[in-house]
Image (cartoon, rainbow, N blue to C red):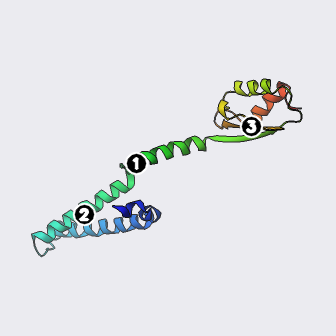
Amino acid sequence: MPIFDTGLLTSHQLLVTVLQWTIFAWLSGRLAAFYFWNREFHGRMETLSYFLGWFIALSGLVINRWEPFKSEEQVLAKQHFERFKSQRQLRIDLASPDNVQELVADLQEIDGVRKGSIALESEAVILSYHKEKVSPERILAVLKSKGHLK
């Protein structure tokens, strides 16, 4: 249905969840009263409607919790966000950008630096790195030891 594409339900997910839990608890209480305290319903159709409502409320809570119907775009976006969350960018200002080929080769040797992300500007190097594998201090220490930084 088009209403599900608007984001209305996802933007008010907490409210919808509270309503689902309220309906589920109320229906559970009515069914428990029917079975344990001999409260009567008006007929079989009302009993059936309470069971059906209880099952729908429980199904809504389960689907809301685990969301088994994720689209391919949602899965790809989540994977992209996880990659983005683990990567950081670093800008290193260079005093004299001499021997750029050697600088790029030394940066590519560092484990954790994304090789395709190394970009050279006029007097700076911009790169991305994995924060779990290498720190900015480690990158700067390697460049100092190789003689690229003073």
Horizontal side, residue 145 vs residue 44: left or right: right
Residue farthest along the left direction in this orientation = 44
Residue at the image position 68 percent from the left and 37 percent from the top: 128
Residue at the spot 42% in from the left edge and 45% down from the top edge: 72
Q: Which residue is mark 2?
A: 54
Where is 13 relative to 149, above or below? below
Give the mark, 2 or 3, whose residue is nearer the N terminus.
2
Q: Quadrant of the N terminus?
A: bottom left
Q: Earlier in the sequence, mark 2 or mark 1?
A: 2
Give the structural element (helix, strand or loop) at label 2.
helix
Depth check, mark 2 against mark 1: the one in front is 1
Q: In this image, 45 relative to 131: left or right?
A: left
Q: Amino acid at mark 3?
A: Pro
Q: Earlier in the sequence, mark 3 or mark 1?
A: 1
Say which of marks 2 and 3 sits in front: 3
Tell me which corner region of the image, top left, top right, bottom left or bottom right, holds residue 39. Answer: bottom left
* Three-letter amino acid code of the residue under disc 2: Trp
Numbered tag placed on residue 136 in the rendering = 3
Examine the rendered structure and indicate whether residue 12 appears above or below residue 133: below
Crowd class of label 1 (few under 14; some 14 to 19; many from 20; radius 10 Å): few
Name the residue that disc number 1 marks: 71
Q: CA distance from mark 2 to mark 1?
A: 27 Å
* Residue contact between numbered discs 2 and 1, judged by CB atoms under 8 Å: no
Q: Tell me residue 96's x, y (percent).
A: 89, 33
In front: 6, or 35?
6
Pointer 2: residues within 10 angstroms few (<14), some, or many (20+)?
many
